[in-house]
Image: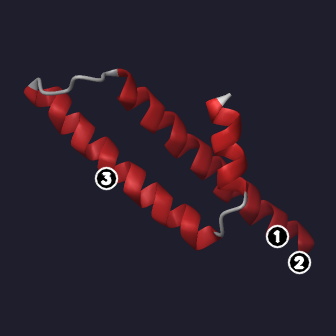
Amino acid sequence: MKSKQRLSDLKVMTKDQLQDELLKLKKEQFNLRFQRATGQLENTSRVDVIRKEIARIKTLQTQMLYSSVIAA
């Protein structure tokens, strides 16, 4: 249920907001990678959640790009 709710939240964002969210998630993913490498990562499932969130945002960005190309 959370992913459906999160997806609906993402769908109403503008392109700039999606890009900002993507940048924030990539920074978090970078930090989690370092925590994993140094053995400080406690919540290992967070890595997968972030990876899937990044994929969702990239998918929405691609859909927006193609819908604007088709509409033009």
Q: Residue furthest left?
A: 38
Q: Identify residue for label 2.
A: 72
Specify the amino acid type for callout 3.
Lys
Q: Identify residue for label 3.
A: 27
Q: Of callouts 2 and 3, which one flags the residue occurring earlier in the amino acid sequence? A: 3
Give x and y (percent) for residue 34.
17, 37
Q: Is residue 48 left or right of residue 37?
A: right
Q: Residue sitting at 37 percent across and 50 percent down?
A: 26
Asked if the residue at tag 1 contacts the one at tag 2, i.e. Cβ–Cβ closer than 8 Å, the answer is: yes
Label 2 crowd (10 A; few <14 / some 14-19 / many >=20): few
Rendered view: 46 above or below 23: above
Rendered view: 48 above or below 33: above
Q: Identify residue for label 1.
A: 69
Classify mark 3: helix, strand or loop: helix
Which of pointers 2 and 3 indicates the residue nearer the eye?
Answer: 3
Quadrant position of residue 12: bottom right
